Amino acid sequence: MKAHWLCGMTVVLAMSLAGCSDEPQPQAEETQGFTLLQRDETTLEATYSAGGASVRMLVVETESKVVEVTYDFGAPVIGFHLDFNQGTGSFIPSGGALDAAQSELMGPLLEGVTKLVAETDEAQRTRVEDAAMRQTSFMQIVPVGELLTGYEFVSERGWTHLSCTCGNQFIGSGYYRQAGRGCGCTGGSGGGCKGRCGQGCGITSTPPCVGTTAYTQDCAKHDYGLGSFAAASDDYTFASNNCSCSGVGTCG
């Protein structure tokens, strides 16, 4: 992918320049927390570091409606190729399993990205901003400690939205479960906002609305351990937002 190739060339060039000097190279001090590196119409790049773990997120619209998203932990590197013209996506992992410390970076990274675009109306967000929020939300449910394999997903397979009102709902495949908006909508266990294609919430969770506000059957099945993270890929990436953020103590 073009974005990956450019990143690789940058690293090679930096290493080559360092090797040309006999002077010891100073070690850059890693900035803790969220750091924005680049933001324009076609690129969003940021890092998040905490507790000795770090991730670099790079989102680039390489051509109209084609977006490459990369989460570089050193190892692993997890990429997405998203073609909104065709309604298709690819999940492209390399370099081993995601560990717990790396996975825990996704929540605060998502909060940092959300704060960047919070003042922009949803209809005015760039494609890279929307992709950054959606795929970082998805990264929160990528399995930890498992060897990941690549796959493709297609928006044409569709999704079925749930009601925004919390209640016992049909979530597909013969299952009925509590789902819908609200931090109290837990289904009796875990976080609230069951069925949301994004970060869940607890009673004291802040900020109250981070990431997407799409609620679908496949996302609900994943929340209840009845469906895979892969099956929810198209919902996270392509499903329209059917529920709004409704204030403190709830989530969108």
Image (cartoon, rainbow, N blue to C red):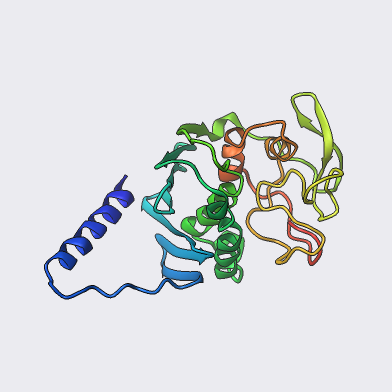
Query: Is residue 67 shown to the viewer in this render?
Result: no
The answer to which image quadrant residue 160 occupies is: top right
Horizontal side of residue 249 vs 114, given as left or right = right
The location of residue 167, given as percent across then percent down, is 88, 43
In which quadrant of the rendered image does the C terminus lie? bottom right
Q: Quarter holding the N terminus?
A: top left
Observer-nearest of 160 and 115: 115
Res 113 → quadrant: bottom right
**Residue at 55% in and 31% down:** 156
**Residue that appears at 58% across and 47% down:** 138
- Tally of marks: 0
- Figure check: 84 above or below 120: above
Task: Look at the image and tell me whether residue 21 can be seen.
Answer: yes
**Would residue 215 appear left or right of 52 to someone viewing this image?**
right
Residue displayed at 52% across by 32% down: 154
Nearer to us in this view, 107 or 130: 107
Is residue 59 left or right of 169 when viewed as pictured? left
Residue farthest top in this picture: 174
Residue 81's spot in the image, x, y percent? 42, 43
* Residue drawn at 60 percent across, 49 percent down: 140
> Which of the pair 217/98 is nearer the observer?
98
